[in-house]
Image (cartoon, helix red, strand yellow):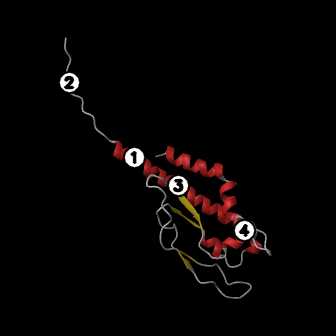
């Protein structure tokens, strides 16, 4: 007895890859948002060192090759030292794009004095708000990524 028939194979790999990439971007976006929130919380652990709020308000995230989540930011109040309100800041351009298949998220600020706050000076102890936000919460950030990938 001979059995015959036709089998049609449909290649859906392009759609599957696109869905995986979209899920990865959603997961990284959620993790970046949380990491920025955690960095702001780290800064606020030393409220006496927050003068205008410009640095805190500038912390944002961007997916590799993408724009910052916020395009502009401003201070909450005038400086207690100078009485002046700092000029608002803006983000332009895009975050670095690694390899074509790589997905990444960047968290940070473009405020010029952030480096001195983060790493300290001869007159001021460091407040490693970015480093601590990630290192102290790596489990939480990993869980955010996992949950987003599982729900996709």
Numbered badge on residue 28: 3
Label 1 sits on a secondary structure element that is: helix
Q: Mark 4 or 2 closer to N-term?
A: 2
The local crowd at label 2, few if under 14, some if 14 to 19, many if 20 or more residues have their Cα within 10 Å, is few
The local crowd at label 4, few if under 14, some if 14 to 19, many if 20 or more residues have their Cα within 10 Å, is some
| Percent coordinates x, y for residue 66 in the rendering | 47, 64
The local crowd at label 1, few if under 14, some if 14 to 19, many if 20 or more residues have their Cα within 10 Å, is few
For the residues labelled 2 and 1, the Cα–Cα distance comes to 30 Å
For the residues labelled 2 and 3, the Cα–Cα distance comes to 46 Å
| Camera-nearest label, 4 or 3 | 4
Numbered badge on residue 5: 2
Residue placed at 43% from the left, 50% from the top? 21
Numbered badge on residue 17: 1
Label 4 sits on a secondary structure element that is: helix
Q: Is residue 48 left or right of residue 36?
A: right
Residue placed at 74% from the left, 66% from the top? 45
| Percent coordinates x, y for residue 71 in the rendering | 51, 73
For the residues labelled 3 and 1, the Cα–Cα distance comes to 16 Å
Q: Nearer the viewer, residue 144 or 10?
A: 10
Residue placed at 54% from the left, 58% from the top? 105
For the residues labelled 4 and 2, the Cα–Cα distance comes to 70 Å
Residue topped by disc 4: 119
Q: Mark 4 or 1 closer to N-term?
A: 1
Q: Locate residue 89: give its quadrant.
A: bottom right
For the residues labelled 4 and 1, the Cα–Cα distance comes to 41 Å
Numbered marks: total? 4
Q: Locate residue 32: give its quadrant.
A: bottom right
Q: Locate residue 3: give its quadrant.
A: top left
Mark 3 and mark 2 in contact (Cβ < 8 Å)?
no
């Amino acid at each position: 007895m001979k059995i015959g028939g036709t089998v049609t194979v449909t290649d859906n790999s392009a759609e599957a890859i696109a869905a995986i990439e979209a899920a990865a971007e959603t997961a990284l976006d959620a993790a970046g948002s949380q990491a920025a929130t955690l960095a702001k919380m780290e800064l606020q652990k030393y409220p006496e060192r927050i003068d205008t709020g410009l640095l805190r308000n500038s912390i944002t995230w961007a997916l590799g090759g993408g724009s910052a989540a916020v395009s502009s930011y401003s201070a909450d109040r005038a400086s207690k030292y100078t009485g002046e309100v700092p000029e608002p800041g803006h983000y332009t351009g895009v975050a670095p794009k690694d390899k074509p298949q790589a997905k990444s998220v960047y968290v940070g600020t473009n405020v010029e004095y952030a480096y001195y706050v983060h790493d300290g000076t001869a007159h001021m102890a460091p407040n490693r708000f970015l480093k601590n936000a990630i290192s102290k919460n790596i489990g939480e950030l990993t869980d955010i990524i996992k949950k987003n990938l599982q729900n996709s």
